[in-house]
C-alpha cells in the first residue's frame, strides 16, 4: 500500500494543487500527529470532500502507533457509515489512479465504466448507452406484466406508467428524471446484461464529476447495494 | 564528460527508482537474493499486486524521458573511456547483479549492463499477458540494480558499473533492419544445419518447427548434436529447458503454439540478441561478457569465440569463482582506491594467451588457469602477511623486552663491549618505530582488497 503514497508524492510534485482521495488525506492528517503520541496510543485523521451545502466522501482513518510500526486500526466512510475493508480501500486507491489518467475533473459515463471495471473485478458496470429506447419499452412491458418490483418508497405502478406516458415520445433520454432512468436501467439489467450488473444510465454525451465515480464504487463496495452486488 | 557529470546522471536514475519504489525498498531483506523474494512476494498478493502495478505503471514514461535526456552524454562518455569495458548480455539482468559485479570487477574496469527497467517497461510489459508476471520481473530487477546504487555512484577513476538502455529499438532503423536481417539469415542457416533441412526463409523454418509437437520430436529430428549448446545435447536437459520455456509463454500475449514454435522463437531470439550484443560492443569499444553458458554459446557459435579479455571476464563468472561473491561489495571500491586493478589483471592473465574460448572446455581451461593464478597471488599475499606478523612478533617478544628490561633495571646489556644508555634508548626507539611501521603495513594489508579476497577464499 505504501507504493500508493509514493504515487501521491509524485502527483503532488507534478502538481502542488493535486487533491488526493479523502482516504489519503485522512491518512496524511493522522500521520502528522503520529510522532507526538506514545506507543500503543491511537491517532485519528479526518478528511472530506464537498461544499458548504453538500459533503460527500468523508473519511476517518485511525492509526495505532507500535514500537515496530504503525497499524491501520480503522478506515470509515462517514457518509455510508461503514468501515472500509482493506481490500475495498485498495480498489478505491486503484480507482483514483485510473481517474487521474483522465484529464480534468469530469468524466464521461463511458470513461467511468471503464475505470470502474478496471479496478472492480467481474466487469460489473455497464453502460445503457443507445439501448435506452428499447429499455423504456421493455420496462413498460415488464411493469404492466407485474414483473417489476418497485421500491417501497417509489410511486405505484400506475403512477409510474402515467409518468412515462407524460414524457413526449420524441423526448431525449436526458429529459427523463434521474430516478426514473435509474429504475428503468436496473429493471432491464437482467435482460440486456449478465446478472449482478450495475447499469449506468447517464446519457452518453453527459459528463459528471470524478467524485461521483468514487461514490458509485463506494456504494457498490460497502453501501446499501453492496449486499446485492458483491464483487466476484 | 567528467565522471562527476555521470554520477549526477545516475543519481537521477536512482531518484526515479526512489520515486516509484522508495517505500517498497524497506521490505527488502538482507540476503543477496532478497530482490527475487520481494518480486515474488509482491506479485503473489492478489489486490496489492494490482495496486502496485497501477501505481507504478507510468514508470515507462519516466524512464524513457530519462534516457532521452541523458543517453547521448553517457554514450559519448563510454566511447571516450580508455579502459577495459565489458557489456553484459543474456538475461534481463544477471540474476544477482551484486555477485556478477563482484566477480567481474576483479578484472574489468567498467561493467556495462542493459537497463533492465527500460527493457521491461518498453518491451516485456507490452507482451505480458499477466501483470503479476511482469510485476514480479520488474520489482526483482529494479532492486537488483538498486542494491548497487553505491557502486554505480562511487567516485572511482573509471566507473565500476554503468547502466545503459541497450536494445535494438534504439538503433537507427537502417542499421537495425540490417542486424535483424543478418540474424534471420543466421537463424535459418543454423536451424537448417541442425535438422539437416533446406529452409528458404524464416517462415518455412517456423513451419517446419511448428510440426514438432514435443521435446522428443525435436530431439529425435536433430541431426547435428555437435552444434548444440551442452545443455541441449542431452534429452533430459533439453526437455527440462523446453518445458520451462513453453510454460512461461502462457504469461505472454504471443500465441503459445507447439513446443517446436517455442524452440524456434528461442533460437531466433538468440541470434538477434547476438547481433545486438556485438553491435553494442563495437559501438562502445567494449568486450562481451556472459554469466550463463547458453547465451555465451550462441555468441561463440556466431562470432567464433571470445578474445582473451572477454574469455577471462566470462570465465570469472563460472561456478568455481562462487567464493568471490563472499567478498564484501566495499572491496571493489578498495581495489580501485589502491589502484591495483591493473596489477590484478596482470596476475589473472598470467599464462593465458590470446586464445579463443569457443568450447566449454576452453572456458574451463581459462577458468582453471585463473583459479591457479589467483591462488598463487593469495598464497604470496598470505606468506607476506605471515612474514610481517613474524617480524612484529620477534620485535615484541625478543628484542624489545631484553633491551627494555636492561634499561629498566639500570643494567647495561653487555655484548663484549660497553654500550651507552643513549644507545640503548636509540635502539629501543628504532625497534619500536620499526614495529609500528610493520604493524601499519599489516593493518593496511589487512584492509587491502587481496586480503579481503584471501579471507573470502579461506571461508569458502
Image (tube, coloured by chain):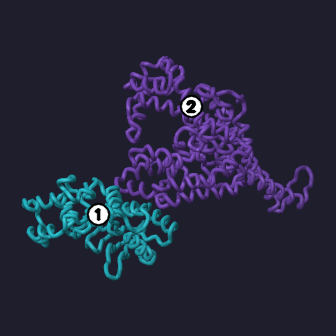
Question: What residue is shown at x 73% (from left), y 50% (from top)?
Answer: B338
Identity of the residue furthest to the right in this view: B417
Left or right placement of residue B161 versus residue A57 in this view: right
Q: Is residue B325 visible?
A: no
Q: Residue A148 placed where, x, y %?
A: 11, 62
Report helix, strand or loop for mark 1.
Answer: loop
Identity of the residue furthest to the left in this view: A145
Identify whether A15 is placed above or below A3. below
Q: In front: A103, or A8?
A: A103
Report helix, strand or loop for mark 2.
Answer: helix
Q: Chain of mark 2?
A: B
Q: Residue B224 placed where, x, y %?
A: 51, 18
Question: What residue is shown at x 16% (from left), y 59% (from top)?
Answer: A137
Question: What residue is shown at x 8% (from left), y 61% (from top)?
Answer: A144
Q: Which residue is mark 1?
A: A203
The C terminus of chain B: image quadrant:
top right
Q: Is residue A212 visible?
A: yes
Question: Residue B244 is drawn in which quadrant?
Answer: top left
What is the distance, in whole Å, between disc 2 and disc 1 at their CAs?
A: 53 Å
Q: Chain of mark 1?
A: A
Q: Which residue is mark 2?
A: B181
Q: In front: B192, or B390?
A: B192
What colour is chain B? purple
What colour is chain A? cyan
Identify whether B406 is placed above or below B184. below
Q: Nearer the viewer, mark 2 or mark 1?
A: 1
Amino acid at each position: 500500500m505504501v507504493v500508493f503514497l509514493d504515487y501521491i508524492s509524485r502527483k503532488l510534485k507534478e502538481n502542488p494543487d493535486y487533491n488526493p482521495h479523502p482516504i489519503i488525506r485522512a491518512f496524511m492528517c493522522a500521520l502528522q500527529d503520529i510522532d507526538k503520541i506514545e506507543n500503543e496510543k491511537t491517532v485519528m485523521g479526518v478528511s472530506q470532500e464537498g461544499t458548504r451545502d453538500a459533503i460527500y466522501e468523508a473519511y476517518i482513518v485511525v492509526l495505532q502507533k507500535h514500537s515496530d510500526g504503525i497499524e491501520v486500526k480503522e478506515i470509515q466512510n462517514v457518509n455510508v457509515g461503514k468501515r472500509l475493508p482493506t481490500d475495498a480501500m485498495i480498489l478505491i486507491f486503484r480507482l483514483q489512479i485510473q481517474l487521474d489518467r483522465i484529464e480534468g475533473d469530469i468524466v464521461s459515463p463511458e470513461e467511468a465504466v471503464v475505470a470502474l471495471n478496471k479496478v472492480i473485478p467481474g466487469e460489473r458496470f455497464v453502460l445503457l448507452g443507445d439501448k435506452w429506447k428499447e429499455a423504456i419499452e421493455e420496462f413498460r412491458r415488464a411493469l404492466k406484466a407485474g414483473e417489476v418490483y418497485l421500491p417501497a418508497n417509489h410511486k405505484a405502478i400506475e403512477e409510474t406508467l402515467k409518468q412515462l406516458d407524460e414524457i413526449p415520445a420524441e423526448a431525449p433520454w436526458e429529459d427523463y428524471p434521474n430516478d426514473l432512468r435509474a429504475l428503468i436501467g436496473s429493471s432491464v439489467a437482467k435482460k440486456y446484461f449478465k446478472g449482478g450488473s450495475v447499469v449506468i444510465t447517464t446519457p452518453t454525451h453527459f459528463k459528471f464529476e470524478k467524485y461521483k465515480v468514487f461514490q458509485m464504487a463506494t456504494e457498490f463496495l460497502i453501501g446499501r447495494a453492496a449486499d446485492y452486488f458483491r464483487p466476484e | 564528460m567528467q565522471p562527476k557529470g555521470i554520477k549526477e546522471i545516475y543519481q537521477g536514475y536512482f531518484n526515479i527508482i526512489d520515486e516509484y519504489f522508495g517505500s517498497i525498498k524497506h521490505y527488502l531483506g538482507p540476503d543477496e537474493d532478497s530482490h527475487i523474494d520481494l518480486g515474488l512476494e509482491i506479485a503473489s498478493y492478489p489486490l496489492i499486486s494490482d495496486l502496485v502495478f497501477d501505481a507504478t505503471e507510468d514508470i515507462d514514461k519516466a524512464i524513457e524521458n530519462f534516457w532521452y535526456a541523458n543517453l547521448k552524454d553517457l554514450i559519448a562518455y563510454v566511447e571516450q573511456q580508455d579502459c577495459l569495458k565489458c557489456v553484459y548480455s543474456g538475461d534481463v539482468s544477471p540474476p544477482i547483479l551484486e555477485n556478477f559485479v563482484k566477480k567481474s570487477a576483479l578484472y574489468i574496469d567498467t561493467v556495462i549492463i542493459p537497463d533492465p527497467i527500460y527493457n521491461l517497461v518498453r518491451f516485456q510489459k507490452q507482451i505480458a499477458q499477466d501483470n503479476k508476471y511482469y510485476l514480479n520481473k520488474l520489482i526483482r530487477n529494479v532492486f537488483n540494480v538498486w542494491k548497487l546504487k553505491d557502486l554505480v555512484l562511487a567516485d572511482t577513476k573509471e566507473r565500476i558499473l554503468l547502466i545503459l538502455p541497450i536494445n535494438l529499438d534504439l538503433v537507427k532503423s537502417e542499421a537495425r533492419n540490417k542486424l535483424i536481417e543478418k540474424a534471420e539469415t543466421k537463424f535459418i542457416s543454423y536451424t537448417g544445419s541442425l535438422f539437416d533441412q533446406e529452409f528458404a526463409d524464416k517462415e518455412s523454418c517456423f513451419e517446419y518447427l511448428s510440426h514438432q509437437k514435443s521435446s522428443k520430436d525435436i530431439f529425435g529430428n536433430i541431426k547435428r548434436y555437435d552444434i548444440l549448446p551442452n545443455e541441449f545435447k542431452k534429452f533430459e536437459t533439453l526437455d527440462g529447458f523446453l518445458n520451462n520455456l513453453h510454460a512461461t509463454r502462457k504469461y505472454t500475449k504471443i500465441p503459445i503454439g507447439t513446443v517446436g514454435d517455442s524452440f524456434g522463437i528461442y533460437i531466433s531470439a538468440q541470434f538477434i540478441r547476438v547481433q545486438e550484443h556485438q553491435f553494442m560492443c563495437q559501438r562502445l569499444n567494449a568486450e562481451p561478457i556472459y554469466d550463463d553458458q547458453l547465451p555465451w554459446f550462441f555468441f561463440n557459435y556466431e562470432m567464433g569465440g571470445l578474445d582473451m579479455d572477454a574469455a577471462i571476464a566470462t570465465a570469472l563468472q563460472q561456478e568455481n569463482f562462487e567464493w568471490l561473491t563472499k567478498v564484501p561489495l566495499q572491496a571493489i571500491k578498495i581495489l580501485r582506491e589502491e589502484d591495483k586493478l591493473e596489477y590484478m589483471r596482470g596476475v589473472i592473465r598470467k599464462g593465458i594467451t590470446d586464445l579463443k574460448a569457443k568450447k566449454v572446455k576452453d572456458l574451463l581451461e581459462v577458468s582453471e588457469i585463473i583459479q591457479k593464478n589467483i591462488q598463487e597471488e593469495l598464497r604470496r599475499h598470505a606468506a607476506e602477511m605471515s612474514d610481517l606478523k613474524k617480524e612484529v612478533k620477534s620485535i615484541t617478544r625478543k628484542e624489545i623486552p631484553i633491551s627494555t628490561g636492561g634499561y629498566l633495571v639500570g643494567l647495561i646489556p653487555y655484548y663484549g663491549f660497553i654500550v651507552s644508555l643513549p644507545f640503548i634508548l636509540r635502539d629501543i626507539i628504532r625497534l619500536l618505530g620499526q614495529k609500528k611501521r610493520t604493524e601499519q603495513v599489516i593493518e593496511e594489508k589487512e584492509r587491502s582488497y587481496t586480503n579481503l579476497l584471501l579471507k573470502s577464499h579461506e571461508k569458502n
